């Protein structure tokens, strides 16, 4: 059962990201502040939900949240600053977009940098514990999936609309056959045999 709040503050923002483990595309982060009376039977960690359920939740969250923000950190920047920093940077940018300033921030995972002077708490598996983090995970995932489906049109051989840029066997075989694209993260090990090549 998801809890509404971690802190005693009413303006508590939850933040999460999607796409950290992908070989291509951006890391997408979201932040959400929910009202006290928010509830939806489907809401859960986005990884536990079907695509259809996430798509149904997204407009509901956007309509009923007190505030939400979504930020993209594209692959060039991921390569430049590393994926952990990209995740935290994305979360900060999504909080920047909130139309109200949160009094407290709860973060999925165990790493975060101070955001201004607002207190925060990192929570491992927070997206399965708190509604605002779960809502942020749904927004981050649906916005990212939508983007991956869009760039799939340009490079259909990688089947990003299905694998979303994750290192599936099919995705790696396509990299083997067609090489890397502008959307691939150059600092990631795109193919297992890259290790052998460096010896």
Image (spheres, helix red, strand yellow):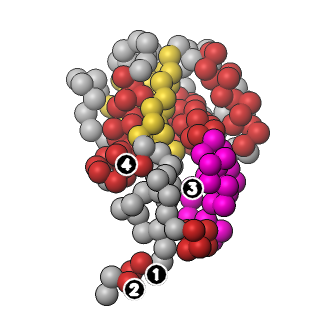
Q: Earlier in the sequence, mark 3 or mark 1?
A: 3
Q: Which secondary structure, mark 2?
A: helix
Alpha carbon of mark 4 to alpha carbon of mark 1: how far? 23 Å
Q: Is residue 76 magenta?
A: no
Residue indicated by mark 4:
76
Seen in the picture, residue 117 relative to 160 is either above or below; the reply is above
Q: Looking at the picture, how far across and down is residue 172, in whole percent?
A: 57, 70
Q: Looking at the picture, how far across and down is residue 20, in whole percent?
A: 46, 52
Main SS of the magenta part reads helix
Q: Which secondary structure, mark 1?
A: loop
Q: Which secondary structure, mark 4?
A: helix
Q: From the viewer's perspective, tell me whether residue 111 is left or right of residue 169.
A: left
Alpha carbon of mark 2 to alpha carbon of mark 3: how far? 23 Å
Residue indicated by mark 2:
196
Q: From the viewer's perspective, tell me whether residue 17 is left or right of residue 168.
A: left
Towards the viewer: 173 or 121: 173
Towards the viewer: 39 or 190: 190
Seen in the picture, residue 174 relative to 118 is either above or below; the reply is below
């Amino acid at each position: 059962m998801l809890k509404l709040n971690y802190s005693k503050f009413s303006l508590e923002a939850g933040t999460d990201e999607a796409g950290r483990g992908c070989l291509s595309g951006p890391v997408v982060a979201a932040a959400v502040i929910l009202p006290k009376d928010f509830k939806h039977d489907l809401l859960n960690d986005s990884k536990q939900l079907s695509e259809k359920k996430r798509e149904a939740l997204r407009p509901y969250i956007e309509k009923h949240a007190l505030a939400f923000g979504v930020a993209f950190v594209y692959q060039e920047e991921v390569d430049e600053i590393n994926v952990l920093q990209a995740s935290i940077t994305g979360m900060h940018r999504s909080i920047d977009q909130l139309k109200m300033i949160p009094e407290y921030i709860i973060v999925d995972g165990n790493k975060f940098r101070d955001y201004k002077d607002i207190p925060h708490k990192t929570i491992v598996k927070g997206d399965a514990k708190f509604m605002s983090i779960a809502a942020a995970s749904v927004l981050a995932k649906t916005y990212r999936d939508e983007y991956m489906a869009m760039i799939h049109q340009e490079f259909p051989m990688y089947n990003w609309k299905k694998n979303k840029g994750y290192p599936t066997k099919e995705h790696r075989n396509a990299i083997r056959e067609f090489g890397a694209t502008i959307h691939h993260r150059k600092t990631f090990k795109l193919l297992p045999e890259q290790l052998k090549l460096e010896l």
